[in-house]
Amino acid sequence: ADDLPKKDPRRERLRRLAARCAEWIARNVEPVPNGWFPRRVTPEGKVYRKTPEGGDDKFWQTSADGLFILQLQAALTARGLADYKASLREKSGLFIRAGGIFGSINHDTYDPHENVAYSVAFRTLLAVSRVLKDDAIRTFAYDKCLADLDQFKMSDDRNGVATKGLLYMEKSWDTAYLWENAEASVAYFEAALDNRKRVPAQSRAYELDGLTILRAIAKHHYGPHGFLTEGVDWNN
């Protein structure tokens, strides 16, 4: 919607649908005991505690998936399309007091720490800090979310596969998925833009982090045939 011309009717339609989506979530999604968002809900918004495979999901209330709700609320608030400041302050405060909630975002993985959770957390909290004008949230985004992406970085080529520069997904499933790596690169580029005037040298370092990931991803692109696979499975 932001990129469409102002006279394009799709622009307002997309914004209206985004606002309706956020309204539905706020009105219908059942709360969970820890105060965060449920990982899954029924079509009515009731908490759904099972996995797609049918077992009990131990991350039913500790998945970083809930960050996407904050991301939507922050985007709408920043554009003057709604006011979710109270929710943003409450939920970001809960997230920070918990030391971060980084459980799997992928629907079929179950791990307390997933690389894309840290990327999404950084991007979301940076946006929230701007909406709320809260430097404490920004500091947590850098010190805990972006900095802790380092634990997933691979600095060598493993098992004959070009993995140097990529981030593996999580301890329970260590494939390097390309969409997650792309999300990490965007996080670093947003950090670079955020620091361009504040700390130029740090901005350049973040920019290089993002480029390193993109170059590593590019090694798995084969001309007109596109990407070899959605994930670089170097360990199976």
Image (cartoon, grey):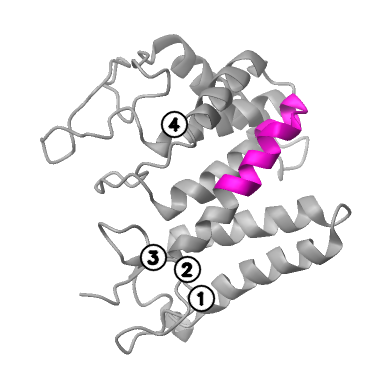
Does dot 4 land on a helix, a strand or a loop?
Answer: helix
Residue at the spot of label 1: 165
Q: Is residue 140 magenta?
A: yes
For disc 2, the marked residue is 153
Q: Amino acid at mark 2?
A: Lys
Which of 214 and 153 lies nearest the eye of the viewer? 153
Q: Earlier in the sequence, mark 1 or mark 2?
A: 2
In the picture as drawn, the residue positioned furthest to the bottom comes out as 160
Q: Which residues are magenta?
A: 128-144
Task: Determine contact: label 3, label 2, CB under 8 Å.
Answer: no
Which amino acid type corresponds to the residue marked 4 in the rendered image? Gly
Residue at the disc numbered 3: 168
What is the magenta segment's predominant secondary structure?
helix
Marks 3 and 4 sit apart, C-alpha to C-alpha, by 22 Å
Say which residue appears at 68% left-offset and 72% top-offset: 208
How much space separates mark 1 and mark 2, taking CA atoms? 7 Å
Dot placed on the residue nearer the N-terminal end, 3 or 2:
2
Q: Nearer the viewer, residue 18 or 174?
A: 174
- State the residue lying farthest toward the left: 54
Q: Amino acid at mark 1?
A: Gly
Q: Mark 1 or mark 2: which is in front?
A: 2
Q: Residue at x 63, y 35 (%)?
A: 10
